Amino acid sequence: IFDLGRVLTAAKEDAISKLQTKPIIVNNYEGGFSSQLGKFNLSAAYYFSTSKLGTNMIQVDGFSVAERLPERVWGYEVQADYQILKQLTVGGNYAYVQGRGDKDSDGNFYGPNDIYLKSNRIPPVKMTAYAKFGDKRLNVELYWMYVGDRDLFQPNAKGAYAIGEGPIHSFDLWNLATAYKVTERIRVKLGIENIFDTDYYPTTSQFYGTNANYTRGNGTRFNLALGYSF
């Protein structure tokens, strides 16, 4: 059942029976595979979901309410890794998601009145790559993450975007995680986020489309930990 709190907060009807409280029934379909060829591993999955009454949020008189329209969401994900050496593995991941709403409920999701689902529900393309090295004492993991663009909506007459419709611009980050076994009981760990101090705005800051939420992401941060096993 959809969020009744939002329904009641924005309600203008004079009877509960008139409220839009029909449940959201989603049909999910998914298929994929996983394969290993020597030192190479590959897996992929595709998914597709439909709903006659979706949960796309819109602003009505200052309240966020659900736009009850048919929806389709689909996407796929691919993961691969390869063991170059006994201690060294490299890999990556690619994920894509998209969603549409049938605004006029005519069964065609690509008509002139139909819409893309907002970015607070549908993320932009995401890609990661990594390298992992590990032996008896040292473990090093280097990660790269890329978040793509998603600019599918238009501002209103005043140049403002609705929540979830702000344009998302791409960015990429590098992160590092290391651990060193000093002795059988002592271990030192070091983690570094945003190694190159990249200036970026997280997707949530961008898709909200408001100055109040448009805040930069964290710069370079590190965490140093010392562990002792009794």
Image (tube, rainbow, N blue to C red):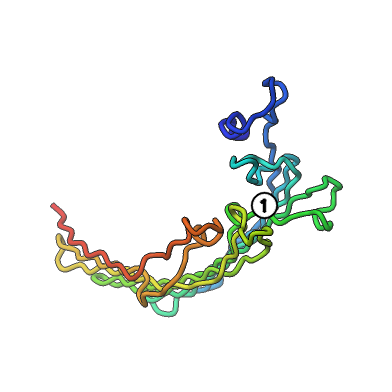
Choose top left, top right, bottom left or bottom right for residue 156.
Answer: bottom right
At label 1, counting other C-alpha atoms closer than 10 Å, the crowd grade (few under 14, some 14-19, many 20 or more) is few
Picture quarter with the N terminus: top right
Question: Which of the two residues, 85 or 168, is positioned nearer the viewer here?
Answer: 168
Question: Which of the two residues, 86 or 225, is positioned nearer the viewer here?
Answer: 225
Q: Amino acid at mark 1?
A: Glu
- Across and down, in percent, residue 64 comes to 60, 42
Query: Would you name the residue on which mark 1 appears?
Result: 30
Question: Which of the two residues, 194 or 191, is positioned nearer the viewer here?
Answer: 194
Helix, strand or loop status at disc 1: strand
Choose top left, top right, bottom left or bottom right for residue 136.
Answer: bottom left
Q: Is residue 100 left or right of residue 150?
A: right
- Across and down, in percent, residue 157 comes to 68, 59
Q: Residue at x 57, y 53 (%)?
A: 120
Q: Residue at x 60, y 57 (%)?
A: 119
Q: Is residue 197 left or right of residue 151?
A: left
